[in-house]
Image (tube, helix red, strand yellow):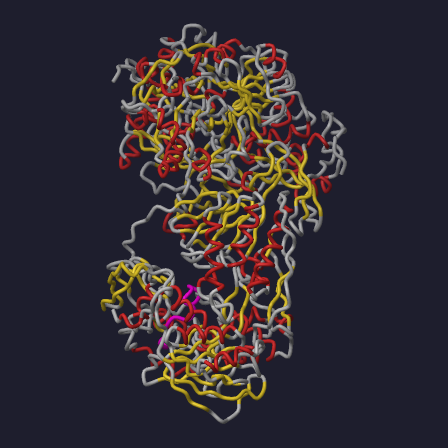
């Protein structure tokens, strides 16, 4: 399909060995799966799909000065904890506690706005501590009409529409590991961002795919998300 | 198939007459129709005998036809204890009987019934334990006779799973009450889950007759089902069992191979009630069944239950059932009413017009049978003269079906699990429930409403309460529940002088067994249960709890409210371990370099939830691989993945102050660019963790922690600071940082090839120094450490670069002879240096003094966690000490945990022990008595098989005591 | 399974929480007697009634306090520890002083 391989890059997703046979596309300093098959993956996304976004930029900040710092960088912040706000450029800010924020990069700029923020941050007198979320956490996107039903096989929090609304954040346990689930409101496509322990993602990826099986779920690439 | 046994439509709600199939029962072929249960198909073929009773091997046939008795337990090839009355028959199914000796029809153990007189209640407890030691003789014989069914040991695990289900209202039971309530609540906007055990909705509406005309039930059923099944707010689970009630309406519902973990804001139990048997002699014969069972046979399966029936009843429902039988062509030889007259006197006239004789104030005193007891052949009727008393005049009638209806027992199991209290109403001879939590309600016959109008009214009212509790609205007004006729006969128990009047069919318990238990002194119903085993069989007291309560009350001169019934614990019906296990989530963690370890042939081992390389090579070559890897570290350079090591970033103005309170050492004046050993005690003064504390800036420390301890320690740090409120941030960066230890005399040379922005010289980067820089262009934290006793650099990088870092180091070190080493090798290397591993060389009692760590305690600071306890402990004499020992090469090698002796007393145990090729001897660490620690003295260790070895106590470390190698 | 209301994350299954022991005031470790210290370290009241306990929502590592009735297991209230611990605690050589908590 193409000649790119994950091992050509310094930054590697812990899942790359599970992406065998997929077509890769460059993403900032690294790569992501463009698509898993020759066929168009839009309908797969709409039905039930799992996308590995681990190589897309994300970062966290915590501290009493973090809100001010992020506002100064032009981010819109959620007013209460456990809510997420979509930014104009497609990135997202989730508020995890009174003083903690999680920034998820956008595929539209290959995450560069967020990765720049991480690269330029320096420890100072400010109570604004960087949290290395890109390295501590893996990032999956679960899409499709069966999102909530898939999660109900893994997680004890009611993530159905109406109860878990767009922009809602749940810090909870799924398949017995800690996860952050964010109901994205980027598109009409029902989808959850799921962040989990990076070291456990190999286990978690398989557990989610297994739960997706009865809904015809499959892994998908980022291509269909970009169109 | 003897088609004459099948009734015409509309009988047979469940069957598909166009789908004929055949199956095997006990080696014989039988025909069936689609939708048949195994039991209904067998009865359609005239086959009633399905099992033998547990104790006396008496012949048994279906009792309830609703999966509520043990009489229909059969064996499938890969599954024992299958309920034939609720399991659908499948084409080619191989069904066999269980608990028989020889064959079901001619069970060699049937003689046991003749000995029942000699096997009184508590027989096993009392007979086989004397004289002492006798149990050993009896046990194998009894084991062979006991137990039901056979396990298929070649069984292949199947895919079972679990799923949460979130609803506003869960309704358990889809009878008239459940349907009505579900519909009412759903109409008001509630999301409703309806759970039904049977394969069709309707409950009693599918088989029972509620009035003389006999058409209303079916009309109402169709009307309710049409409304429920099309309702967008109602989700229905059929053939599903709510198997328990747990706190806050957490309901395990089993359907097929899935366990639904239902979480309901409100729960309504409309589980109905169990038809109760009447107790008389031979009430367990095949052909004697609950009235509702005969009705189920006809209405659900279109099976004619007999040619000539006698209906024994204590309520009007028996009259209605007699009409059903009559209409379906069963001759009703007699309606026997235990009461003086029916509640509705018109029923007498109605039956008379059908030519059915009614015997009032009469009971069946004994069911009669032909030789072999295969089926009921008649009844001995007697006038009732008092409670449980009958006249001596008898009337004998022939019949092949005896229906009995002694009353109803609410299906109270879930409700009692929720804390509901049962009280017996002597007037109604019925149990009532109270004391339920606010989010749980009961309705329908489980709530004592039996007349159909009352059931619907009660369900509507209940739904209105639920709607209000959910914050929804409904226009409906409350319905009125009218007084209704009594349904329970107060004493449907007629003990027979010759016994065989069964209270509990599962356990073959007769009236006298219960009475005798109370006479022996077991007055409490719970003790009666345990002594007699009443209610402990598969049907869990569904039919025996009420008569047992009545008998115990009578025998102990108390009322039934006082005696109560036995506790009904979850699960409601038998559940498989596979349901409980589900898919079995078993998380594991892998480092970024995991794939490289596998490629290098690592033997992986678990370290907590992490997967780590033990060593590289074959399982069988452990010793060889370890020694080679260790020598390579000593002589050249090795690389170990230490990403699993716990890592915490502690940042902020109070970072030093915070660490000063958490760890025993002093950190306030620790220079930037240096690391310091960090030991942690808990409030008891016990050593719980250790690590290295690196200061990268005034307000930034990076502390390592043990792999298994870091999560707990991180949580404890947060808990402490929730109280101290220091200006500090603690972040667990364990998974965020990949790390390696590049160790060995050539390590500096290898690192110099990749790291140009840090002065790596001994002067520029001395032992215990820490630096930040880049390795192969990757941002890295570098730490000079000495854990394995050689010049070494720990390199910590963001996890995303972990695998790349491994690759470039392996490549850069190729010329120097780099090779990876595993955790087992690392443990050997650190043992040579005498370094303890917390939780391997320490236990839940280890104090700093016992492991020679008092040097790591600051005496000048005002506080650290455990300080006061450590001080108190230090005032007391030390009882044990961790010492190093050696044994000559070739000696019996002690294992971890082997005991250290002091004379005949145990003074300690071995905590680590390995053979060291480098030193040419066995080395180890062991706890020993405080007096046993003098270097040169002998340490007696009891090894495998009780053999003693005598190790020599030595000074630590074993290797390079001057630390010349690591401080290069 | 029981539900507990986390002050940060809302109502969750009790399996998402870690128990952190009863809230008890630490005596001044510099001045208290050995017996007082041992009592603090080893003994619990185990009262039948409403007790205040430490609980942590495990996925978010958030510690909070809960008032729970040990007889009925009813959770009466959960709240942020700032309600009790509202000022910085410092230790001094001769006295641990200034605990933000009242016994």
Q: Is residue B60 magenta?
A: yes
Look at the picture and state if B55 lies above or below A142.
Answer: below
Left or right: residue A64 compared with residue A1: right
Task: Name the side, left or right, on which B244 lies relative to B436.
Answer: left
Name the dominant secondary structure of the magenta segment.
Answer: loop
Q: Where is residue B519 in the image (x, y as percent from the top left)?
A: 57, 80
State how many labels appear. Answer: 0
Q: Residue at x 52, y 88 (%)?
A: B383
Q: Relative to the observer, which residue lies in front, A114 or B661?
A: A114
Corner quadrant of residue B936? top left
Report the front residue among B398 and B11: B11
Q: Quadrant of residue C67?
A: top right
Q: Is B35 on the left-hand or right-hand side of B537?
A: left
What range is drawn magenta here?
A: B57-69
What residue lies at 65% left-to-right and 55% top-to-bottom? B478
Quadrant holding the N terminus of chain B? bottom left
Q: Position of residue B842 (x, y in %)?
A: 51, 37
Q: Residue furthest bottom?
A: B393
In the rendered image, the vertical position of residue B648 relative to residue B489, given as above or below: above
Is residue B811 covered in magenta? no
B438 sits left or right of B289 in the view: right
- Image location of residue B263, percent across then percent down: 53, 45
Q: Is residue B964 visible?
A: no
Q: Between B221 and B282, which is closer to the camera in this rendering?
A: B221
Q: Which residue is drawn at 39% across and 25% down?
A: A51
Q: Position of residue B219 (x, y in %)?
A: 47, 60
Res B29 visible: yes
Please tell me whether residue A112 is drawn above or below residue B46 in the rendered image. Answer: above
Where, quadrant-wise, is the C terminus of chain B in this rendering?
top left
């Amino acid at each position: 399909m193409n000649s790119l391989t994950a091992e050509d890059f310094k930054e590697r997703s812990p899942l790359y060995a599970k992406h065998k046979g997929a077509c890769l596309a460059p993403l900032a300093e690294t790569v992501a799966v463009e698509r898993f098959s020759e066929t168009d993956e839009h309908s797969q996304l709409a039905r039930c799909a799992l996308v590995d976004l681990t190589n897309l930029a994300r970062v966290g900040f915590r501290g009493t000065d973090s809100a001010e710092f992020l506002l100064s960088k032009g981010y819109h912040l959620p007013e209460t904890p456990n809510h997420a706000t979509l930014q104009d450029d497609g990135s997202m800010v989730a508020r995890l506690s009174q003083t903690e924020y999680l920034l998820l990069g956008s595929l539209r700029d290959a995450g560069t706005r967020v990765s720049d923020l991480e690269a330029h941050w320096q420890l100072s007198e400010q109570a604004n501590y960087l949290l290395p979320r890109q390295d501590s956490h893996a990032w999956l996107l679960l899409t499709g009409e069966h999102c909530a039903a898939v999660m109900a096989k893994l997680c004890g929090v009611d993530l159905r529409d109406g109860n878990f609304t767009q922009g809602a954040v749940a810090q909870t346990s799924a398949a017995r590991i800690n996860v952050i689930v964010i109901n994205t409101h980027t598109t009409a496509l029902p989808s959850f961002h799921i962040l989990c322990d990076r070291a456990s993602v190999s286990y978690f990826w398989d557990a989610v795919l297994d739960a997706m099986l009865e809904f015809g779920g499959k892994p998908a690439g980022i291509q269909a998300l970009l169109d | 198939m003897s088609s004459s046994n099948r009734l015409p439509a509309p009988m047979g709600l469940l069957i598909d007459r166009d789908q004929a199939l055949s199956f095997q029962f006990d080696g014989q072929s039988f025909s069936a129709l689609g939708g048949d249960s195994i039991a209904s198909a067998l009865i359609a073929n005239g086959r009633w005998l399905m099992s033998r009773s547990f104790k006396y091997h008496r012949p048994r046939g279906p009792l309830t036809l609703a999966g509520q008795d043990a009489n229909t337990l059969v064996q499938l090839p890969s599954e024992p204890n299958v309920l034939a009355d609720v399991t659908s028959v499948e084409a080619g199914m191989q069904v066999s009987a269980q608990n028989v000796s020889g064959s079901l029809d001619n069970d060699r153990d049937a003689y046991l019934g003749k000995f029942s007189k000699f096997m009184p209640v508590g027989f096993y407890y009392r007979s086989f334990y004397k004289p002492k030691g006798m149990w050993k003789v009896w046990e194998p014989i009894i084991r062979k006779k006991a137990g039901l069914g056979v396990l298929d040991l070649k069984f292949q695990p199947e895919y079972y799973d679990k799923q949460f289900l979130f609803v506003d209202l869960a309704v358990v039971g889809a009878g008239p009450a459940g349907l009505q309530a579900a519909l009412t609540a759903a109409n008001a906007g509630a999301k409703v889950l309806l759970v039904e055990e049977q394969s069709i909705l309707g409950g009693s509406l599918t088989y029972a007759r509620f009035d003389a005309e006999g058409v209303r039930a079916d009309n109402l059923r169709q009307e309710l089902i049409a409304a429920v099944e099309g309702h967008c707010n109602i989700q229905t689970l059929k053939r599903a069992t709510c198997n328990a009630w747990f706190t806050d309406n957490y309901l395990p519902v089993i359907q097929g191979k899935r366990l639904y973990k239902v979480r309901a804001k409100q729960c309504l139990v409309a589980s109905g009630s169990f038809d109760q048997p009447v107790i008389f002699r031979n009430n367990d014969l095949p052909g004697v069944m609950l009235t509702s069972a005969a009705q189920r046979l006809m209405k659900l399966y279109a099976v004619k239950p007999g040619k000539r029936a006698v209906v024994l009843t204590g309520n009007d429902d028996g009259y209605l059932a007699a009409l059903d039988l009559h209409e379906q062509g069963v001759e009703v030889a007699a309606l026997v009413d235990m009461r003086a007259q029916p509640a509705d006197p018109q029923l007498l006239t109605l039956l008379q017009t059908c030519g059915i004789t009614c015997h009032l104030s009469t009971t069946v005193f004994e069911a009669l049978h032909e030789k072999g007891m295969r089926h009921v052949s008649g009844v001995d009727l007697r006038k009732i003269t008092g409670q449980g008393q009958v006249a001596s005049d008898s009337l004998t009638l022939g019949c092949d079906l005896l229906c009995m209806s002694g009353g109803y027992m609410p299906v109270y199991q879930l409700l009692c699990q929720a804390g509901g209290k049962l009280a017996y109403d002597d007037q109604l001879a019925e149990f009532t429930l109270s004391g339920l939590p606010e989010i749980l309600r009961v309705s329908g016959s489980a709530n004592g409403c039996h007349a159909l109008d009352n059931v619907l009214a009660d369900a509507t009212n209940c739904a209105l309460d639920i709607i209000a509790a959910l914050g929804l609205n409904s226009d409906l007004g409350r319905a009125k529940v009218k007084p209704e006729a009594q349904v329970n006969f107060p004493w449907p128990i007629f003990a027979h002088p010759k016994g065989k009047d069964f209270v509990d069919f599962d356990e073959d318990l007769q009236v006298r067994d219960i009475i005798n238990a109370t006479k022996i002194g077991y007055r409490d119903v719970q003790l009666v249960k345990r002594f007699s085993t009443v209610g402990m069989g598969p049907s869990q007291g569904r039919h025996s709890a009420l008569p047992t309560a009545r008998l115990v009350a009578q025998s102990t001169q108390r009322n039934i409210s006082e005696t109560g019934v036995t506790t009904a614990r979850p699960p409601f019906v038998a559940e498989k371990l596979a349901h409980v296990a589900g898919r079995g989530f078993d998380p594991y963690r892998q480092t970024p370099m995991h794939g490289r370890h596998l490629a290098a042939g690592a033997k992986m081992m678990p370290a907590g939830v992490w997967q780590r390389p033990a060593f590289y090579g074959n399982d069988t070559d452990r010793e060889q691989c370890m020694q080679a890897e260790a020598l390579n570290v000593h002589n050249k350079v090795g690389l170990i993945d230490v990403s699993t090591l716990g890592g915490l970033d502690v940042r902020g103005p109070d970072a030093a102050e915070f660490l000063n309170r958490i760890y025993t050492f002093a950190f306030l004046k620790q220079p930037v660019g240096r690391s310091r050993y960090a030991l942690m005690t808990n409030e008891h003064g016990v050593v719980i963790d250790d690590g290295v504390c690196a200061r990268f800036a005034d307000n930034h420390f990076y502390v390592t922690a043990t792999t298994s301890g870091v999560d707990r320690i991180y949580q404890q740090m947060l808990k402490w600071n929730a109280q101290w409120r220091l200006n500090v941030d603690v972040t667990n960066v364990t998974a965020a940082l990949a790390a390696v230890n590049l160790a060995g005399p050539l390590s500096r040379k290898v690192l110099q090839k990749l790291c140009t922005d840090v002065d790596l010289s001994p002067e520029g980067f001395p032992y215990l120094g820490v630096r930040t820089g880049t390795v192969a262009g990757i941002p890295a934290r570098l730490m000079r450490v000495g854990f394995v006793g050689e010049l070494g650099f720990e390199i910590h990088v963001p996890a995303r670069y972990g695998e790349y870092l491994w690759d470039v180091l392996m490549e850069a070190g190729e010329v120097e002879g780099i090779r990876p080493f595993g955790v087992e090798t690392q443990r050997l290397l650190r043992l040579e240096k005498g370094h303890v591993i917390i939780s391997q060389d320490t236990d839940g009692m280890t104090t700093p003094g016992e492991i020679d760590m008092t040097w790591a305690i600051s005496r000048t600071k005002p506080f650290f966690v455990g300080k006061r306890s450590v001080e108190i402990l230090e005032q007391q004499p030390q009882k044990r000490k961790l010492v190093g020992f050696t044994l000559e090469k070739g000696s019996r090698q002690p294992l971890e945990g082997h005991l250290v002796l002091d004379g005949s007393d145990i003074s300690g145990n071995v905590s680590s022990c390995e053979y060291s090729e480098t030193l040419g001897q066995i080395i180890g660490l062991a706890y020993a008595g405080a007096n046993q620690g003098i270097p040169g003295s002998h340490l007696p260790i009891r090894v495998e098989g009780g053999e003693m070895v005598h190790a020599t106590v030595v000074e630590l470390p074993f290797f390079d005591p001057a630390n010349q190698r690591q401080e290069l | 399974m029981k539900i507990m209301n986390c002050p940060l994350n809302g109502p969750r299954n009790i399996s998402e929480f870690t128990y952190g022991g009863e809230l008890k005031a630490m005596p001044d470790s510099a001045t208290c007697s050995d017996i007082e210290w041992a009592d603090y370290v080893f003994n619990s009241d185990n009262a039948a009634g409403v007790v205040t306990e430490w609980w942590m929502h495990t996925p978010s590592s958030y510690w909070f306090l809960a008032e729970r009735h040990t007889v009925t297991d009813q959770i009466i209230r959960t709240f942020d520890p700032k309600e009790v611990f509202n000022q910085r605690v410092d230790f001094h050589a001769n006295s641990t002083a200034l605990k933000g908590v009242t016994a």
